[in-house]
Image (tube, rainbow, N blue to C red):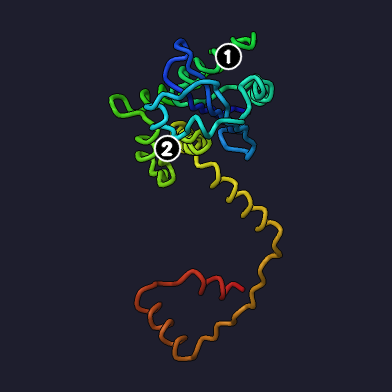
């Protein structure tokens, strides 16, 4: 099953106020496991970035000068998203911003039936507990040392780990390792063992016979031996 994990960074919090997408990242999943394929783009929004938003993601207006406009990356983004489910943390936020960008280009909005919101999944699994990406990474012991700002590409990679844990912690990599080990075992030649002969001394024979005399009456193997 193919899914696309999505994250965006923006100039502010509300597309209705004219805020724009400045970074978009998509990460391809197959059966919930990253395949290595991804789409990533920084975008010139054609407007200033709110200071509060810049403090969160660390992307300045100056760093986006010369980057493509959203219209220039839209076709490649839509092609990568295809028709598959879209997984995002606080997905209504990302869907709302992308819908606003698509509307400017007369493109259709994203189908909400495709939305998989990991915030909703986290609140269902851990009711009453914090559901931020940082909180979930700490809960699942996922390394946050590189997350000094909300970089979309890093956030996608962290969310891929969180998503698997929210689905039950399937740890798919272990299955791949086990399968590889099984294939290697089948391919390896069978081990050979040299038979080792056990030699019983006369004293051991006498001790065993004395033990039987004391504890076993008419051993069955004696009658079998006599019949032979």
The answer to whether mark 2 and mark 1 are in CB contact below 8 A is: no
- Out of 76 and 220, give the one closest to the viewer: 76
Between marks 2 and 1, how big is the CA–CA gap? 27 Å
Which secondary structure lies at badge 2?
loop
Which secondary structure lies at badge 1?
loop
Residue behind mark 2: 149
Quadrant in the picture for the N terminus: top right
- Out of 41 and 221, give the one closest to the viewer: 41
Quadrant in the picture for the C terminus: bottom right
Q: Position of residue 174 (x, y in %)?
A: 54, 47
Residue density around tag 2, few if under 14, some if 14–19, many if 20 or more, within 10 Å: some
Residue density around tag 1, few if under 14, some if 14–19, many if 20 or more, within 10 Å: some
Closer to the chain start, of discs 2 and 1, is 1
Kindly identify the residue that appears in the image at 59 percent across and 82 percent down: 197
Q: Let me know if residue 20 appears in the view.
A: yes
Residue behind mark 1: 110
């Amino acid at each position: 099953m193919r899914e696309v994990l999505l994250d965006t960074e923006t100039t502010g919090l509300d597309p209705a106020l004219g805020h724009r997408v400045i970074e978009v990242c998509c990460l391809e999943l197959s059966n919930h496991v990253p395949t290595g394929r991804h789409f990533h783009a920084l975008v010139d929004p054609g407007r200033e970035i709110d200071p509060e938003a810049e403090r969160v993601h660390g992307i300045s207006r100056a760093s986006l000068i010369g980057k493509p406009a959203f219209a220039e990356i839209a076709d490649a983004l839509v092609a990568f998203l295809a028709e598959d489910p879209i997984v995002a943390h606080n997905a209504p936020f990302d869907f709302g911003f992308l819908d606003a960008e698509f509307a400017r280009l007369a493109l259709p909005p994203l189908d909400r039936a495709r939305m998989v919101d990991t915030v909703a999944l986290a609140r269902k699994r851990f009711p009453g507990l914090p559901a931020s990406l940082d909180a979930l990474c700490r809960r699942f012991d996922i390394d946050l040392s590189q997350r000094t700002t909300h970089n979309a590409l890093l956030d996608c990679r962290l969310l891929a780990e969180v998503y698997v844990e929210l689905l039950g912690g399937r740890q798919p990599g272990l299955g791949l390792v086990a399968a590889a080990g099984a294939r290697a075992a089948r391919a390896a030649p069978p081990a050979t063992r040299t038979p080792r002969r056990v030699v019983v001394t006369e004293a051991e024979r006498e001790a065993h016979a004395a033990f039987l005399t004391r504890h076993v009456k008419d051993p069955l193997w004696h009658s079998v031996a006599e019949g032979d």
